[in-house]
Image (cartoon, rainbow, N blue to C red):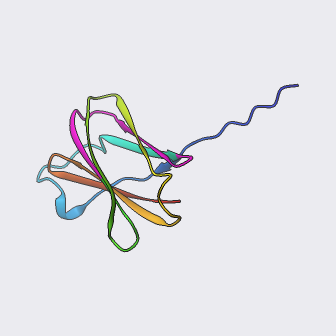
């Protein structure tokens, strides 16, 4: 008998940063993120363009920063295995809107 263990990625709940919210309401978050084994997978559901990714530690210091160009229905990964154990906040800037979520290592 073969036993298979399925490992699921932990979702990162993304919220819009209120002070950066656009004047017109959006109909959902155009990206999603999950983490598994120190790799964050970001999926662009409906957004096409540049995404600025910034990860900050508990002190608010930037520990990782990158820019990715994406198209709708695509994904990219961010390796965070080099970061120390702790709680981090990831920020995604899409045009004039900032989404953020927390994750633990």
Furthest residue toward front:
82
**Magenta segment boundaries in residue numbering:** 36-53
Furthest residue toward bottom:
59
Tell me the residue at 33%/71% (across/down).
Answer: 60
Secondary structure, magenta segment, majority class: strand
Tell me the residue at 15%/46% (across/down).
Answer: 95
Instruction: Tell me where residue 77 appears, x and y as whole percent.
Output: 41, 39
Task: Answer left or right for 25 relative to 42.
Answer: left
Tell me the residue at 38%/61% (across/down).
Answer: 89
In this view, 40 is above or below 83: above
In this view, 41 is above or below 96: above
Tell me the residue at 28%/47% (across/down).
Answer: 66
In this view, 29 is above or below 75: below
Task: Answer left or right for 78 relative to 70.
Answer: right
Instruction: Tell me where residue 37 appears, x and y as whole percent.
Output: 57, 47
Task: Answer left or right for 23 relative to 16.
Answer: left
Furthest residue toward left:
23
Which quadrant of the figure contains the N terminus? top right
Q: Based on the displayed image, in which of its 4 quarters is residue 15 positioned?
A: bottom left
In this view, 71 is above or below 61: above
Furthest residue toward top:
1
Q: Does the magenta stretch include residue 44?
A: yes
């Amino acid at each position: 008998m073969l036993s298979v263990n399925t490992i699921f990625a932990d979702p990162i709940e993304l919220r819009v940063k209120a002070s950066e919210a656009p004047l017109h309401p959006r109909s959902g978050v155009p990206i999603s993120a999950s983490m598994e084994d120190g790799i964050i997978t970001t999926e662009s559901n409906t957004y096409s363009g540049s995404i600025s990714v910034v990860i900050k530690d508990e002190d608010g210091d930037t520990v990782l920063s990158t820019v990715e160009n994406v198209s709708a229905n695509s994904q990219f990964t961010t390796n965070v295995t080099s970061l120390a154990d702790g709680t981090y906040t990831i920020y995604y800037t899409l045009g004039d809107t900032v989404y953020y979520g927390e994750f633990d290592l």
